[in-house]
Amino acid sequence: MPDPDGLNSSSHFRALLVYLVPHTHRMVLGFVFILTGQVIAVQIPRLVRRAIDELGPAIGNLNAVDGVSPAVSVAFWGIVLLGIGSAITLFFSRYLVITVSRLAEQQMRNDLYAHLQSLTPRYYNSISTGDLMTRAGSDIEQVRMLLGPGIMYPLQFGILAILAVAHMLYSNWLLTTVVLVPLIALSVWVNIYTRRLHNLFMVSQEIYAAMSATVQENLSGIRVVKAYCQEEAETARFEEINRQYLDKNFEMIRLRGRLWPIMRYINGLGFALILCFGGWMVAVNRLTLGGLAEFIQYFTMLFWPIVGFGWILNVIYRGTASWARIREILCAVPEIISVPVTELEPEIHGSIEIRNLTFRYREDMPPVLRNISVSIPAGSTLAIVGPTGVGKSTLVHLLLHLYPVPPGSIFIDRTDIRDIPLEVLRKNIAFVSQEIFLFSKSLKENILFGEESQGSDIDRRMRSAAWKAGLERDVSQFPQEFETLLGERGLTLSGGQRQRTGIARALIRDCPILILDDALSSVDAETEELILRSIQQDIQRHTTILISHRISTVRNADHIVVLDDGIITEEGTHQDLVERGGLYASIFQRQQLEESLGIRS
């Protein structure tokens, strides 16, 4: 992966070269074929000139024609062989260079995806999913065009133009000077237009990213859209963005529409100049008829590099613009750098100690947690309760090291969490979040997600985990049981079924630390009681952290802390806190009243 050392032009170029260096041998061989092919191509007009000059006198005297001249035969077979050689070199040059661009594209996608995996949730809060998808999709495709055609055609056209101009000057420098003037003017004009196309493309890509984000958000939140009858409003919003995208593309079409007719006109003007001045030179014997034919062919060869110059510039501008957008992601420095995994990593037993932890999401924001200190012996259960938004989930996210942890504030088995490799840390923590994310795969694949040991008893362990999570009865009613395919984000399941699937996914891993972050909020009281009873043995075998706003979930915990406004206001056992008469007691009394009235909080 390129080293994100800045976003200036030189670093852009160096980072892009990294993808070509492993394929240097292919590129060099491709360049050899390109050079050979162009050298072969410029020999054909010379043979045409010789043949026509040889046939000229004979055409004037039909009686003198006695079979095909040896010079004409040589020219004929020479053109045939050169044509075959040109075709072969063209094939191999394209095959080699374009293959390199595809391999570079593959590596670039892998690097981008791996780098996205290394970024913390804070980064994803600052950029839309649609924008990321655009950069990972169409932007990488534009960079591939830059590394393939954007390298091959400039080299091919450049060599061809140099050789063609050299032969034209050698053939007749005066006629060459006359026809090059409009071509030079064309190249300048094409450069101006392609710069304007580049600016329009940048704006178009930004609009396309916004459009992708709109589609992604609406499809993900389709239930909310329908529930609030916002179909027409969201359709109108999408149509407005789509119209802006269409307008920018129409503007690019208009620019391209002006470009091609003018290029055709200048091409025709060049031919007119050749016929006018060249014809006059032939008439005054300053140029042979074969020389004029040769000159026309060289001009035709030269015209296509000039015409292609605009397209090449467009590819280069688009590719560099897209590479800049991709580099913005690659240059995003991960906030958390994992220490390397060693061969003798100590086994994690699960004791946790938090010392004077203070955390804020940004420097300009007030702290979410302040001076949090708590000790959790291995194998014990800690419960965290408190109102919504007081930092309960933030605390467990820090235990998972999802956000930068202040040094000397969180220890696992007396080791600073910052000194534990992320892979080792997270493989030893089974985590069930408030919002369960399920993949568009089978139920079995979702439960086994993250489970690396796929032994012969995996089905038995999966069924055991599903039974403990209270999911077994639901599975028996599914059309294909555990092989049933779930919809996107598991929307074919109810909220409670999704939560129980998440619990089963955590239990099957059998990690020394188990974290349940309000994982029973979507199930009823009876199901909650059954699940807690089923996983009681697992809770006793692991260091468990229970987060819940329900007292019924946490009352049997070994230790309970009450968070309020980012600080610990109370701690102790259930009985101690009830007798103390503080916030915990008031929550407990309110929930008892709600239960007696048949209200489920």
Image (cartoon, grey):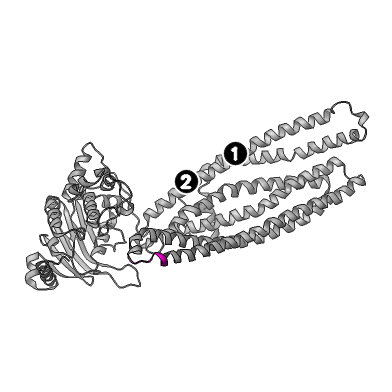
The kind of residue tagged 2 is: Gln
Q: In which image quadrant can residue 574 be found?
A: bottom left
Q: To which residue does mark 1 refer?
A: 29
Residue 465, horizontal then vertical, whole percent:
19, 47
231 in magenta: yes
Disc 1 secondary structure class: helix
- Residue 398 location, quadrant: bottom left
> Residue 302's x, y, as percent?
73, 48
Q: Nearer the viewer, residue 471 or 87?
A: 471
Looking at the picture, does residue 344 appear above or below residue 366? Answer: above
| Quadrant housing residue 185 | bottom right
Q: Is residue 16 visible?
A: yes
| Magenta-drawn stretch contains 282 | no
Label of residue 525 in the image: none
Left or right of 260 on screen, residue 391: left
Part of the protein shown in magenta: 228-232
Q: Residue at x 50, y 53 (%)?
A: 138
For the residue carrying disc 2, how many other residues have a C-alpha within 10 Å: few (<14), some (14-19), or many (20+)? some
Choose the circle earlier in sequence order: 1 or 2: 1
Left or right, 24 with reference to 216 = right
Q: Image point 57% across, 42% down: which residue?
A: 97
Q: Callout 1, which amino acid? A: Leu
Residue 81 versus residue 206 in the image, above or below: above
